[in-house]
Image: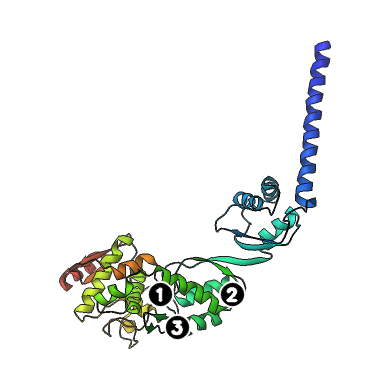
Amino acid sequence: MGWTRRIAASILAVLIVICVAAGVGVLWFVHSVYDDRALPQRQATEIVPPGATASQTARLLEHDGIIRSALAFELLARLRHQQSAVHAGQFRFAAHRTLNEVFQQMVTGGSQVAAWVTFPEGFTARQIAATLAAHDLGDEATLDRTFLGSRIRIDSTWTRSLEGFLFPSTYLVPVDATPAAIARQMTETFRAQLPRDAKSRARAHGLRVIDVVTLASLIEREAKADDERRLMAGVYYNRLRRKMPLEVDATIEYTFPYHKTEITRADLASDSPYNTYRHLGLPPTPIANPGRASLLAAFNPEPSPFLYYVYRGNGHHAFARTLEEHNANVARYLH
């Protein structure tokens, strides 16, 4: 009987310790989440990078003195099943907020100062405007008018619009930014991404920098594999030198209000200045906003004898030197 009493007493003691620990834990959690207003000590801002998890965000907030306990933040997110609801961006926090108030800001976007927005390579100015509007960062029509109605100067030459010069990337855009400010942010990034010797490289091909950017936009819309971009650039330069029409489907598609899966005979017969089947040389403006890989390819084409290419699947093209070879490739891959 003595052993039985001692075992029962031990079990009871363990249960008491567990209950006390649990009670202390609950009190600590409730205090940490709802009562503690020690932090932040003054108004603060925090930038949460895109793709950050609730755990990473919690550690960032703790490190910068906005909350006291990353663990409490993580537990709250788990209890509310909101681990994936935490926003990225830049936030402003008033002094002496509870962790719960900070958490609510992070999941609702309250007091957000700036939002992360990604613009993929090859987006047009209109697609960029639509993306910004979808993030509540401006009116789509106003953004569109600003992008297509503004100009910048590139090496003594004024562009016709900002098409082609809005560098595709991920930006932290202030929520109160004007269309002009957003345009300036993107065009300044474009300038930084140009090769330092862009002007001399363009002149070596008898072109201006803005012409090479236009050519880069064609590469961006046509190429799918990075290892073909320079080769494709070489094809365009070869055709320009020989006074051959570029015959790029993407230039015609640029004039369509919506994407079309096929270019028709009627499209090929259109008299648009963007119809590179009918008009020699480059289109009047870039047809998209090229990324760095396409820009570098356009300024540094790969020399080759190729004048033609056709898509052969799996992200690659078949290149040809003569029309006869090209027609054979077309028959092989498109029929």
Residue 299 seen by the camera? yes
Horizontal side of 77 relative to 144 (left or right) equals right
The numbered mark, 3 or 2, whose residue comes first in the sequence reads: 3
Measure how far apart labels 3 and 2 are at the Cα level: 19 Å
Measure how far apart labels 2 and 1 are at the Cα level: 23 Å
Dot 2 alpha-carbon crowd within 10 angstroms: few under 14, some 14 to 19, many 20 or more: some
Give the amino acid at mark 1.
Ala
The numbered mark, 2 or 1, whose residue comes first in the sequence reads: 2
Q: Residue 190's spot in the image, x, y percent?
A: 43, 71
Horizontal side of 102 relative to 208 (left or right) equals right
Q: Give the camera-side residue of 296 and 315.
A: 296
Give the amino acid at mark 2.
Ala
Element carrying mark 2: loop
Horizontal side of 316 relative to 55 (left or right) equals left
Element carrying mark 1: loop
The numbered mark, 1 or 3, whose residue comes first in the sequence reads: 3
Q: Give the camera-side residue of 290 and 63.
A: 63
Residue 288, numbered circle: 1
Residue pointed to by mark 2: 177
Q: Nearer the viewer, mark 1 or mark 3?
A: 3
Measure how far apart labels 1 and 3 are at the Cα level: 15 Å
Residue pointed to by mark 3: 151
Q: Give the camera-side residue of 227 and 167.
A: 167
